[in-house]
Amino acid sequence: MSCSRTRNVWAVCKRELGGYFTSPVAYVFIIIFLVLAGFFTFNVGAFFARGEAGLGAFLIWHPWLYLFLVPAVGMRLWAEERKAGTLELLLTMPLTTWQAILGKFLAAWLVLALALALTFPIVITVCTLGDPDKGVMACGYLGSLLLAGAYLAVSSMTSAMSRNQVVSFILSVVICLFLLLAGWPPVTGMLVNWAPAWLVDGVAAFSVMPWFDNLQKGVVDSRGLLYFLSLILFALFTTGVILRGRRTN
Amino acid sequence: MIAANTLVKWFGAKLAVDAVSFTVAKGEVLGFLGPNGAGKSTTMRMLTGYLPPTSGTISIGGHHLEDDGLAARALVGYLPENAPVYPEMSVTGFLRFAAEARGLWGKERNLAVERVIETCFLEPIRRQTIETLSKGYRHRTCLAQCLLHDPPVLVMDEPTDGLDPNQKHEVRNLIRRMGADKAIILSTHILEEVDAVCSRAIVIDRGRLVANGTPAELRARSASAGQVRVRLQGPAAKEAAAALRALDGAAAAVVDAESAAGITLIVSPDPRDGRRPNLGPAVAALVAARHWTCDELRVEEGRLDEFFRAVTVPDTKREEKG
Ligand SMILES: Nc1ncnc2c1ncn2[C@@H]1O[C@H](COP(=O)(O)OP(=O)(O)OP(=O)(O)O)[C@@H](O)[C@H]1O
Ligand SMILES: [Mg+2]
């Protein structure tokens, strides 16, 4: 039974992956991601002038790049199926809604992971120019991947809400921006002056930023991993609830 | 195989399906008829588990849709309205996916895909991207998808929509062939199709089931059923009409046409105890006794379109009546 479950997820995932690579979505995403990552790292982040042997100048931009690029990939997840009517086909197959959601999510995440993997030249550069801590670099990449997954799950949720892709894009950018800014020092600094400490901590606890920062510094904190995984699971679960609800009207 | 019990579906404040019940057994092809917006597609969406009914129960092959949805859906092949397909995929790619989603992998999958490509005549376009297909081919691709796992239950929403006359014919033959050992439900606006493939038909109007019977039964309930049409040479129109009207069991006899070839009269039966007497022999006997020349005598079977119009409310009158 669990074998057939995995196979069902894989069937959906494989179809999605095929869809990404037969349409320009995957290529456009990967190219834009690489170009922007390069631009921010080398031109804005002054990668070479820093003289650090690390990925700091590179990874620091990821939350902001993903903020726009991931919702652009995720907005089509359900909106497109709904519009083309294939949602009816997909959900009447002998799959659970959860399997369909997971399959589609994993496929999109794999595309994001591929884009991230294609930034490997920067790792080579760092390694040839200096003597970086490999563990910290791996952690940094892990953080970036988890962050992309979290944004993607949020986009999947907003995509299920509306058949209009523009609406779902804007909604997910706003939610991701909240997740990003809730723990950003300027924002928490603003709150700290008038809000009680528990509220500041509460809001900051929603934020992806502290966990992302930790991973960048090479701190693998089980709470951080738990945070990302529960955010992803929560958003995917909500996707299921919305899909089930939206079918009724 | 399929049992739907008092299905009700509300869309907000709008009642789309109102207490519809029916069953379909193995070996039956059930036709769904009804005007636009009657609730045919909504009923089919509930049968296939896409829309949950507001109330009522559905069981497919003994599996209840709410408790055991996966097992129930595994028995069903579904062709949704407008035949949705993934535009960016190739025909074979799409069919492979549909097979895998239904649990067919590897060799089994390839065999199933080859089989439906043959039954749905997709060979010439098998490598083409679905986006670039004509409407009829797209429709056939989606039709192929629902036959992959050779399901015991088929639910098809307008299966011949957009097909050319040859393909309509092929698909009807296919459905009739498959009907022998499957339970099939199809919706259609083409009444000849009901005659051609359905063993039973139900008519839905504004969400309510208004008729359920074999095509012959439904036809027999139309106004023209049992009428006798005769063309006579010799007698005067008035005399013939009076004589025919006086026959036992006749309610009326009117002159339909008068020409050099003769006069055509229509004799309507007088329904007794809900049954219409067969006037054919009586009319023939009268013609013989009076030594009239008759070159046409036909007992009307009734017409489905007439019956359909009688039991459904046309769009234009809906506001006043509904
Ligand atoms: N998602 C929905 N939200 C609100 N109303 C809906 C929805 N789907 C269908 N309806 C309404 O339910 C009624 C039945 O629609 P349905 O599509 O079942 O009709 P149909 O019998 O298939 O018609 P057609 O012959 O045109 O295909 C219609 O009045 C329609 O407007
Ligand atoms: Mg319909």
Image (cartoon, helix red, strand yellow):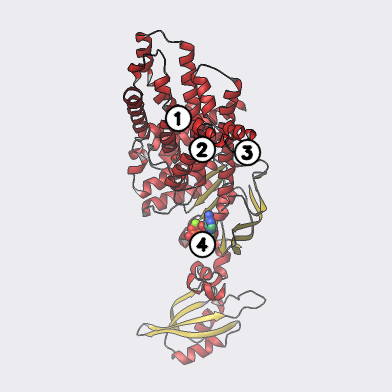
Q: Is mark 1 within 8 Å of ligand 1?
A: no
Q: Amino acid at mark 2?
A: Phe
Q: CA distance from mark 3 to mark 2?
A: 42 Å
What's the mark number on residue B37? 4
Which residue is pictured at 57% across the width and 24% down the height?
Answer: A224
Q: Amino acid at mark 1?
A: Pro
Check if mark 3 and mark 4 are on a common chain.
yes
Q: CA distance from mark 3 to mark 1?
A: 43 Å
Q: Which subunit holds the residue at mark 1?
A: A
Where residue A28 sits, quadrant-wise, is: top left
Q: Which subunit holds the residue at mark 4?
A: B
Reply above or below: A234 against B37.
above
Check if mark 3 and mark 2 are on a common chain.
no
Which residue is pictured at 31% across the width and 25% down the height?
Answer: A43
Label 1, on which residue? A63
- Percent x, y of residue B316: 48, 73
- Frontmost of labels 4 and 1 is 1
Q: Quadrant of the N terminus of chain A?
A: top right
- Frontmost of labels 4 and 2 is 2
Task: Give the structural element (helix, strand or loop) at label 1.
Answer: helix
Q: Is mark 4 within 8 Å of ligand 1?
A: yes
Mark found first going from the N terminus, 3 or 4: 4
Label 3, on which residue? B71
Asked if one can make out residue B33 in the rendered structure from this viewpoint, the answer is no
Local crowd size for mark 4, using a 10 Å CA cut-off: few (<14), some (14–19), many (≥20): some
- Percent x, y of residue B288: 50, 82
Mark found first going from the N terminus, 1 or 2: 1
Q: Amino acid at mark 4?
A: Gly
Label 2, on which residue? A178
Answer whether labels 3 and 1 touch (C-beta < 8 Å).
no
Asked if one can make out residue A142 in the rendered structure from this viewpoint, the answer is yes
Q: CA distance from mark 4 to mark 1?
A: 48 Å
